[in-house]
Image (cartoon, helix red, strand yellow):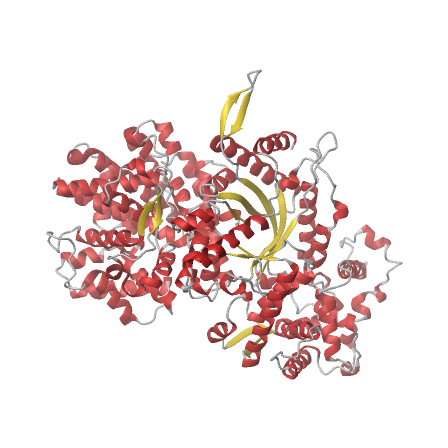
Amino acid sequence: MLNAEINQYLGVFSYPFVSLDFLDQDLLTQFFENERDHACRMELRKKLAAYMRRTCDINTLDEIYLILDKWYLYPGHPSQAGKQKNSPDCGFDLIFKHLLCFSKSLISQRDGKIIYKYWENERDKEILSGFSGSNKIYLFHSMQRMFSMDILIALYLVRNKKAAADLSGNYGQIHVSDQLLDSVLEKGVAENHLHSGVAASFQRVWEDFMLPITEAKLKALLQTEPLPDLFYNKKEWIYYLCLAGMLRYFCLWLTANGQEAKKGVPEEFGKVWRILQQHKVKENFAALTGSDDQGSLEQWVLSFWQEVLPSCGSIPKVRQEGIMHTMFAGYASIQTSDENLFLYHVLSTIRKQQEKGGDLSCLGNLKLLFLSYLRIKNFFYRTVVQQKTIHGLMYFQSAYYQTNSAFGRAALQITGVPFWERAIREQLQSQNLHKIEFRTSLSAQEKDNKINVFSFLVAYRNILRSDYCRKTRGREGELRYEPIGPLPRAALVCHLIKREQDYDPALCAYHGDEAHCRQYMQLHDQYQIQLQCLTDLRSRKNAQGMYLGLDKFIVGLDVASLESAVPTWVLTDLYEQARDSRSEPLTCHTGQSFQSLGFTIHAGEDFRHILSGLRRIYEAARGLKFHAGDRIGHGIALGLSPEAWHRAHPTIVIPRLEALENYLWVYSVLSSKTSADSAINTVYLEQEIMKLARDIYGERRNLTLSMLVRAYEKLYFPPETGGQWERLQACARCLEISTYTPSNPERKVPQDAREKQTSMPVNTGFFKESICKLHNSAQRELCAWSVTELVWSVHCRQYAYAMNEPIHRKVTEQDICIAGEMQRLVQCYLNEQGIIVEVNPSSNVVITDMETLSENQVYSINHAGYDFRNVLTCVNSDDPSVFNTNVTNELGYIYFGMIERGTHRESTLQWIEKLRDTGMRASFIRNTVSDECLLRELDNIIKQF
């Protein structure tokens, strides 16, 4: 498998400069110092094997060891020309020799940008081995998530003797494009699927952590939540972050002092130097946190910065902007990140000292400090940027999304930068971005939603003013902002979060467990409150009773997170309410038309069976009544090869009801089609449906295939959406009344429930009257079913337990035949309805069963030419920080992937133009007012909010 082989190849290569193992025992250096000692080799292999098992799939240990030999240990491999191979810093030289080769092979420049070198060159076969040629783009894509690529940019500049000023405008991204692609993308692109919680790049967040630590910042840092799955001890990750900041300073101190570095060495330098030289990083942490003095770690950090800050320049400026812009005057005016300047400065200093043959001891110290810094930085990088190791949305959320979000929040704690200011500014660094939608969660508290929206509007306006306008004075001396270029448009899409319900099918209302009888009702009620908050926000009025215009900045509704946790029927009436035009005005305060919500939902992204993914896409589009212009998030099941999925999943574990509903859905859709050439065996479908149904309902009289299909359709595509939840509410009131007894005087019964006691007595409650009557039936098999009772059976213990029970099933050839046919039908349905699929290439490859970018579903669902199955598609980044990407690079990956598939370049460019244009037209941002009017709108809304 290509992706696993690439990860294995790059994982071994990067191990010496991304793992903390080398801080406590630099086995690579020991190997060279001890004349290639066999014991060192075996110990290095042992640690490497343990590291690789944690980080990627392994074919064989033998292959891992051979790759290690290739990169670092093979006897004929020179560490550096003219240098003794047992030199203490030859490990550094060997690592950077390889990094330099990667920089030569993968990095170039065009039109003032650092770009991916897509063309073949003489270095490819040497450094990329079997992954050169058509596989080069796949290796580059994987490397982007392996370690921070800003080091390759710095090496490129130093190797080509570029000035630091050439970094101006670069913030660590390598552009994936060529000149022809640029000519298409410069027309403007839209980002329609981006989660705000991980909008800031690793480089930006890391730079925040590298600012000098003050007592207030350290206190805020210690009060933050621990990063999930990073360290067992919260103080440990703070220790390593602080240590990285110290190493960063020492590197700069050595470059500033040069051969005079032996004079006036700071006391704290000696402490940290001894820790690194003696490989006692973990021992030092244990000493700082294991003593009776619980503040020793804090004291160690604060005393360091108190001693060294005076040498960095203006202390307030250092604490705000970083060291590079104050410690070195020549960098003050360069518009780039502090980290970019740091990497360039250190590498250029090392190169100059090597060429001049300066103080070798000073140079060796600088190399050791710099490499130790990179190890800590890249360790954190691999922790918050996802590798392709374990598939699935649940792993992504628990292992990376939460960690990345927590990492970003901790950075905000120490910098005090408003969240939205950093998130918006970070994304607007992407070239050609004209429209961007940020997805943000809804709260059940109106106040929290107001604060979130207000903060977004203020940050957005301030960035437009500072980065896209010039200040002028009006006739009366008032300050004005005049746009100097097109203003990018930004807005919010609010989403409801799917999560596992607090429901136990072993409990039942019939036996007095009334709190657990209404499946998904608690979640549904929470969603309803959140939706009401959204509606109220969009229709807020000013003092004159006119609508504020928030409809142009809160533009969509989404449902995200664990796809299989909540069935689509739970959301049906919610989307119906949100779409109800009666709740919207026709015009807002400026006389402009009031913009209706756009609708999207994550579907077909994470599934146990490919039929489940296809079914949820169809249920969302039809059951939630999606119209032309509404969107489906991800939709991976639409284009994933059923045969390829089957090879990876010959057997599956799936809840029994999910398997049953998959077949019921297929039967329901096929029943409405008249095509006679379908290869689907309907007898197979009927047999599987009835077998699964009997396992749930038993041998009931009159239980037929027709009733099961009609019950499924009534549950997911009801003619009236509100009836189910109203009936559940009534049932809940009945149950609350029925459990009120003199022996339980503390029980609180809602007043409206007491008032309904006479009109809805207990013995007419739903559970008493229909489903739960079967608990006491001596002749259960003789009871007749109705379609309504089948619909409501999902709320009854008698059946819910069997419905939710996981079963092991073999995926048959008939299942794959069915999946292929249903893919075709769902694609045609989406095309007919004008529903757009939001494709996220990097996210889709990393989270799902796709092997490489060339297997992305976009190639299957949207072709370069006309095709009746073509589905309208837009390309997005999803979680740019987790996958280290942006929307322009995502289009670039799709572009180069298409070329590697052998498509003619002219057709590819036309196809990319179609995807770009669809993305712009599919955006829910439809505010067409002038730039000047946009600024006035923002001012008015903020003033009146």
Tell me residue 352's x, y (percent): 18, 40
Tell me residue 485's x, y (percent): 49, 34
Residue at 46 percent of width and 59 percent of height: 907
Residue at 70 percent of width and 54 percent of height: 574
Taking depth in this image into account, of 863 and 815 the one nearest to the observer is 863
Taking depth in this image into account, of 341 and 399 the one nearest to the observer is 341
Quadrant of the image occupied by residue 164 = top left
* Quadrant in which the C terminus is drawn: top right
Does 553 sit left or right of 302 as displayed?
right
Taking depth in this image into account, of 426 and 404 the one nearest to the observer is 426
> Can residue 338 be seen by looking at this rendering?
yes
Residue at 76 percent of width and 83 percent of height: 781
Q: Residue furthest right?
A: 758
Tell me residue 674's x, y (percent): 69, 75
> Can residue 772 be seen by looking at this rendering?
no
How many labels were placed on the picture?
Answer: 0
* Quadrant in which the N terminus is drawn: bottom left
Tell me residue 627's x, y (percent): 67, 56
Does 700 sit left or right of 454 as displayed?
right
Residue at 19 percent of width and 62 percent of height: 73
Taking depth in this image into account, of 204 and 352 the one nearest to the observer is 352
Does 237 sit left or right of 185 as displayed?
left
Seen in the picture, residue 888 relative to 659 is either above or below; the reply is above
Q: Residue furthest front?
A: 906
